[in-house]
Amino acid sequence: MSSWIKALNPLDAPTTEPDAKQKARASAVALVISAVHGAIGVALLAANMETMRTAMVEAAAAQSAGQPAESAAMMQSMVGGAVDAMPWIAGTIVVIQLGLAFWQWAKPNIVIPIIFLLLTIYGLLTSVLGIATNGLGASETAASPVWNLVLGLVVMVLAALFHASGIRGAAALGKYKVRD
């Protein structure tokens, strides 16, 4: 357990090849944690499809006010398709994250942690800015209650730390492989 705590610390430099490999695998742990949170989001979306559909139809109606009837009808039909596709798209992202987690665990590299660190930082910044701009309660929807938004922030902070640790471990692992 203490070796994993050490591996998840992005400030601790690995001193051996097994330490570097374990540290590089921290990114895989972050991907699994993010995928679990994503699966919760998929379940919330699927459980609240009608609420989401109603909210999106109302928003589309407000946006298409004053436009020709054909445009409004087209907008309404697009909204229905978008609502139906959201859980499938989110589920696909969860599966991709799990696949990349497996890949990172089996063959640690530096590319996956870098990409996901950047995506995580972007997600964290947009979430924090959205909350700062609108307030936490304004960001709440049926498919994304406040507890899930807070959990998402915690997951993103942890994922950023784990991906940073994964970058450090993968970089060190690359140096060990060059020496061989």
Image: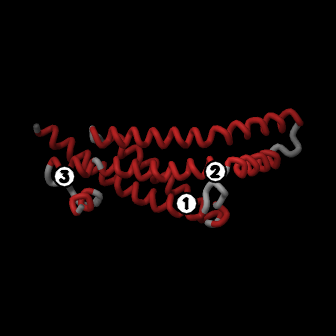
Residue at horizontal 44 percent and vertical 51 percent from the top: 34
84 to 132, vertically: above or below: above
**Which mark lies nearer to you, 3 or 2?**
2
Disc 3 designates what residue? 19
Q: Secondary structure at mark 2?
A: helix
Residue 125 rendering spot, x and y as whole percentages: 51, 57
Disc 1 designates what residue? 148
Q: Earlier in the sequence, mark 2 or mark 1?
A: 2
Q: Secondary structure at mark 3?
A: helix
Alpha carbons under labels 3 and 1: distance apart: 34 Å
Residue 73 rendering spot, x and y as whole percentages: 83, 36
Residue at horizontal 57 percent and vertical 60 percent from the top: 129
Residue at horizontal 29 percent and vertical 48 percent from the top: 25
The amino acid type of the residue labelled 2 equals: Ala
The amino acid type of the residue labelled 1 equals: Asn
Q: Residues within 10 Å of mark 3 (few under 14, many from 20)?
A: some
Seen from the viewer's position, the closer of residues 116 and 140 is 140
Disc 2 designates what residue? 47
Image side of residue 76 versus residue 137, left or right: right
Alpha carbons under labels 3 and 2: distance apart: 42 Å
Q: Secondary structure at mark 1?
A: helix
Report if the CB atoms under discs 2 and 1 are less than 8 Å apart. Answer: no
Report if the CB atoms under discs 3 and 2 are less than 8 Å apart. Answer: no
